[in-house]
């Protein structure tokens, strides 16, 4: 059997923890998935997976095999891309990761436009705010919002990320308007678990203010905070890219106009400039162009 395919099947099983999910993702029967894994174990003369009725876990040999298989598959993808570099049509698969809120707010739309121009290309987008090892997870490109990107990665800025305080008119009618950032501790505040959970910083011209808040509701995703503040739960700090037409329609109003949080930057991050595939280069250029005008 094709050993590279067997490695690819094994990596998917190890990642998903499920033979059935792997079969669905790779569009093959569960029996074929089992056969590929068994053949790989027979070839290596080692048990790679511990199987029970409820779970699939890696053995020590499986952990080693997973790392090496991922490296070999990544190398093969690079070889395929390099040998096709003179082909005008982009093809293959790219793996991306991005925060939920930015993927929801803008990236999904932009990726759809990019794929419409390159129909032979496939993109696998992993959504989440958790830290991901790009090499181990075989991620080609990470879209992250930060003031200090990982120095071990290559960072290409895409756009500035501004954030402002917002609340629903129903909350303002009930609780009134704060007049200064120092008034916020008296209000119901909603915070992001990974950014300013208990302390908010604001800038107005040359004036800088730091305010400690008592967060009544915290979430690790900005889209959750958006829904909560729309429901009148309190005041929160949200990126402008996420609010869309909520301000125009009057669903939300800006609190403390003139005060903003220190801006961050939306970056495209990747492990190395060496052997960057034509597809990744094309997507990078496309993202830079799309977000240059900062439509939000």
Image (cartoon, rainbow, N blue to C red):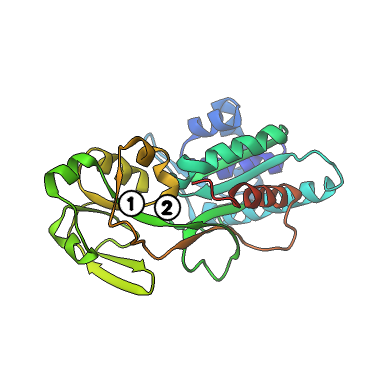
Q: Residues within 10 Å of mark 1 (few under 14, many from 20)?
A: some
Q: For mark 2, what is the residue? A: 129
Residue 35 image offset from top left, x and y in percent:
60, 33
Identify the residue at horizontal 41%, vertical 38% (top origin). Answer: 245
Location of residue 108 in the rendering, given as x and y in whole percent from the top left corner: 53, 38
Under circle 2, the secondary element is loop
Q: Is residue 266 left or right of residue 204?
A: right
Determine the CA span between mark 2 and mark 1: 8 Å
Q: Identify which residue is drawn at 20% across, 62% down.
A: 213
Residue placed most toward the observer, 71 or 147: 147
- SS label for mark 1: loop
Task: Choose the circle earlier in sequence order: 2 or 1.
Answer: 2
Picture quadrant where residue 27 is located: top right
Image point 67% across, 47% down: which residue? 286
Query: What residue is pinned by disc 1?
Result: 220
Q: Is residue 204 at least partly visible in the picture? A: yes
Above or below for 210 versus 110 = below
Q: Residue at x 70, y 63 (%)?
A: 273
Pointers 2 and 1 in contact (CB under 8 A)?
A: yes
- Which residue occupies the foreground of this view, 35 or 251? 251
Q: Quadrant of the N terminus?
A: top right
């Amino acid at each position: 059997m094709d050993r590279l395919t067997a490695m690819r099947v094994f990596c998917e099983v190890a990642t998903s923890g499920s033979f059935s999910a792997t079969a669905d993702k790779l569009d093959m029967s569960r029996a074929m998935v089992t056969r590929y894994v068994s053949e790989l174990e027979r070839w290596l003369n080692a048990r790679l997976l511990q199987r029970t009725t409820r779970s699939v876990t890696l053995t020590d040999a499986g952990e080693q095999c997973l790392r090496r298989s991922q490296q070999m598959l990544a190398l093969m993808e690079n070889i395929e891309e390099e040998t096709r570099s003179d082909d005008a049509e982009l093809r293959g698969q790219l793996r991306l990761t991005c925060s939920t809120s930015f993927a929801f707010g803008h990236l999904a739309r932009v990726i759809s436009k990019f794929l419409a121009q390159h129909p032979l290309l496939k993109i696998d987008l992993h959504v989440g705010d958790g830290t991901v090892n790009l090499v181990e997870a075989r991620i080609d490109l990470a879209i992250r919002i930060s003031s200090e990107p990982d120095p071990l990665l290559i960072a290409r800025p895409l756009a500035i990320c501004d954030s402002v305080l917002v609340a629903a008119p129903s909350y303002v009618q009930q609780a009134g308007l704060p007049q200064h950032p120092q008034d916020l501790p008296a209000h119901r505040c909603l915070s992001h678990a990974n950014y300013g959970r208990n302390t908010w910083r604001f800038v107005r011209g040359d004036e800088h203010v730091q305010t400690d808040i008592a967060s009544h509701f915290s979430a690790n995703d900005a889209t959750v905070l958006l829904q909560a503040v729309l429901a009148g739960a309190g005041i929160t700090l949200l990126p402008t890219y996420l609010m869309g037409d909520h301000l125009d329609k009057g669903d939300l109003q800006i609190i403390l106009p003139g005060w903003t949080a220190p801006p961050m930057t939306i970056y495209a991050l990747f492990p190395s400039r060496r052997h960057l595939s034509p597809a990744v280069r094309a997507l990078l250029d496309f993202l830079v162009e799309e977000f240059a005008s900062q439509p939000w």
